[in-house]
Image: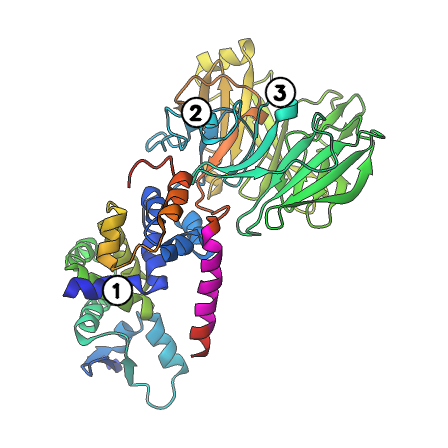
Amino acid sequence: MTSSKTIVLRSSDGATFEVDEAVALHSLMIKHRIETGGADSTTIDVPEVTGNTLSKVIEYCKKHVEAPNSDDLKSFDTDFVKVDQAVLCHLAKASYYMNIKGLLDLSSKTIADMFKGKTVEQIRETFHIKNDFTPEEEEELRKENSWNLFV
Amino acid sequence: MEGLDSGSLIGSNDDLLIEISVRLPLKSVLRFKSVSKHWLWLLSHRRFTLRYDNNNNNLPKSLGLFDTDDVYAPYDVANPTPNPLGSSRTLASYFPRPDVRIMQSCNGLLLCCSDYRHKPSRMFFVFNPTTKQLETIPFPPSFPTESDIRMSLAFHPTECPHYKIVCVGTLEENYISQIQVFSSDTREWKISSEEFYSLSLSFVNGVYWNGAIHWPPCGGGSHWNLMCFHIESQQLQKLPLPKEVITPIIRTSYFGESRGHLHLIVNAEYSNHFCVFEMLRDRSGWFLKYRVQLNGLPPDFLEMIHVYAFGIMDVVRGETEEDTLVVVTANSILIKYNVHDKSFNYISSDHQWLITGWYEAHRYIQTVECLVICSFMSLHYVYAYYVKLVTLFW
């Protein structure tokens, strides 16, 4: 049996997860923490990420570290992001914060694909953004983009 | 309820917004600029535009060619990019003046001139064909409006967010030529210290490379000149011609830049093969980069080279050496030819391709670089900067 070191990751809501060091190092943020860490580098706090999201992130890292050349990696990734919008957004945020490039690419691309066809109004609704252009400013914008027939 | 969470999760996080936006198709990026002032600012900011322009997608940076007008020929045969101007719109429809032609393409921006048939009304513009942003260039102050002025555009997005225009013109009083430089950040023309009699120099068809505008060889007999004007130092420099070129008659068959390399082809008109020279970075000379043999092309095309006008439209360096292309034309047919494996493809343009001069073909490079942000946004810039400052110290 290989004696691999394990790391404990603690989420924002106090949930703890014991993972192999190799899996944890898939996050460059954690790698950096361990490399520059002091005495207690066996428990690492990840305050930006909730327990639910962290468990999914770990699932992703496990698969990519333990079986990086497996044939079903692509289908794993495809299925991995078949989650609802909220989970997807949390995954994107976590992967950005934890610096996991593959997961950031995957989740951001999936979100981008979800939003690319939306209208400006729909984007405002989804992100709860107020339209802060005055009618005159919108007119100036419209003139600049007058070639764009699709709103 | 969860929708509320995820929306504000991303919406309030600029870094995440950028991560997602760099993976959006171009149309969506341009459309979403209308969402809010913050999105307009973010999607126009260099932090985003530089990343977006360099990020994607295995697309070659040079997407196609314009002629001086609206005719567009995409390079990718499998996934041709549509004419960015729209196939039913004319180039002039984006401009406030008629008779518009493209003079130069430089890293995604186009230098254009209107009223080209009527000099006194002539106006110059910098146009981004991807975003359709347009900036009018004020006429250089000391040159008479009917005079033959020569304009060149200098722009490189990663070097500097601002573009410069170099104008060579002649003063009325004494026929001395002067060089002025316009900068897009100050929007002012500054007169350089270079003054000369320009009777033998032409300063047309300039190419921006390595911090300077280079003009193709001009002259005759034993007097040939290859000049460049350094943007920073504002000085002219005379450059050597390739030493391999020894014939007294030099016809520039191609002069252009690609991926940081400056290429020159001379005297290629009447043969099936030609040499592509590349300039050394210190400008001390040239070296022979490629010997291009066109024998791999279809015989009926090769026949046309001798009968019709043959032109070299572009030399495009690929991301790898194996992807380097030369685009040639004869009798309205366009072919892109891979210099290494000698494979070739016919390229089709949306209207008939009539030009044969390299200086009449202008590359299309997609860029979301924002020339100028709407006037009402200037306050927003100050606000955004202030917010950043406050959050830094809090």
Q: How far apart are marks 3 and 1 (CA)?
A: 55 Å
Q: Earlier in the sequence, mark 3 or mark 1?
A: 1
Magenta region, main secondary structure: helix
Please state if A49 lies on the left or on the right of B326 as rendered.
left
Letter of the chain that mark 2 sits on in the rendering: B
Letter of the chain that mark 1 sits on in the rendering: B
Residue where numbered disc 3 is placed:
B118
Residue where numbered disc 2 is placed:
B90
Q: How far apart are marks 2 and 1 (CA)?
A: 42 Å
CB atoms at circles 2 and 3 under 8 Å apart? no
Q: Which mark is residue A14?
A: none
In the figure, residue B192 lies in which quadrant? top right
Instruction: Check disc 1 and give the amino acid type.
Output: Ser
Q: B16 above or below B276?
A: below
Residue where numbered disc 1 is placed:
B8
Q: B140 above or below B202?
A: below
Whether residue A142 is visible to the viewer of this picture, yes or no, is: yes
Measured as percent of width and height from the top left, residue B118 is found at 62, 20
Q: What stretch is highlighted in magenta?
A: B376-389
Tally the numbered discs. Answer: 3
Measured as percent of width and height from the top left, residue B297 is found at 45, 20
Residue depth check, mark 3 versus mark 1: number of the one nearer the observer: 3
